[in-house]
Amino acid sequence: MSSTPQESARPVQLQDIRAGSEGGKALFPGNLDLIQGLKVSLSVSVGKSEITVAQLFALKEDALLELDRATNEPVEIWLDARLVGRGELVAVGDRFGVRITEFGGAGRT
């Protein structure tokens, strides 16, 4: 057992606040200097494939896995779990790249 005095517990009284009624100064008043140097990770989804566990275990080197997208369909650009854009898959030297055709905007999930 501890020899420190026991603290008493007491109920907390919370103040009712209505959404949108917060006053005060904006934390980021249009100035992004504070966060401009932060790095984010974008990923590009070329497509998906659904297979059974038996098919998964039967995969071998050089096997082909067919994706659910046609070669002329746009790829999806993701920021974490949020779809933020679409684009065209391109070759940039010996690497893949994405030419952005849509970015941002409402209606993304």
Image (spheres, rainbow, N blue to C red):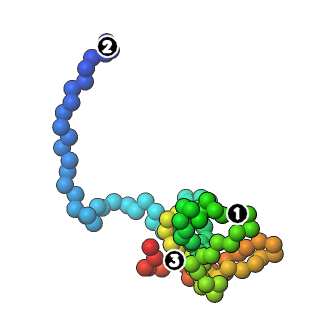
For the residues labelled 2 and 3, say whether their Cβ atoms are less than 8 Å apart: no
Disc 2 on helix, strand or loop? Answer: loop
| 59, 27: nearer the viewer | 59
Whether residue 53 is visible here, answered yes or no, is yes
Q: Quadrant of residue 78?
A: bottom right
Which tag is nearer the camera, tag 2 or tag 1? 1
Q: Which mark is residue 104?
A: 3
In three-dimensional space, the C-alpha distance between marks 2 and 3, rounded to whole angstroms, equals: 58 Å
Badge 3 crowding class, 10 Å Cα cut-off, few under 14, some 14 to 19, many 20 or more, is: few
Amino acid bearing label 3: Gly
Badge 1 crowding class, 10 Å Cα cut-off, few under 14, some 14 to 19, many 20 or more, is: few
Q: Quadrant of residue 92?
A: bottom right
The quarter of the image holding the N terminus is: top left
Residue 75 x, y percent position in the rendering: 60, 78
For the residues labelled 1 and 3, say whether their Cβ atoms are less than 8 Å apart: no
Whether residue 77 is visible here, answered yes or no, is no
Amino acid bearing label 2: Met
Q: Which mark is residue 30?
A: none
In three-dimensional space, the C-alpha distance between marks 1 and 3, rounded to whole angstroms, equals: 39 Å
Q: Which residue is mark 1?
A: 60
Residue 108 x, y percent position in the rendering: 46, 76
Amino acid bearing label 1: Lys
Q: Quadrant of residue 48?
A: bottom right
Q: Of all residues shown, which one is farthest toward the right?
A: 93
Q: Residue at x 60, y 76 (%)?
A: 67
Q: Where 15 falls versus 103 (above or below)? A: above
Residue 41 x, y percent position in the rendering: 60, 62
Q: Which residue is mark 2?
A: 1
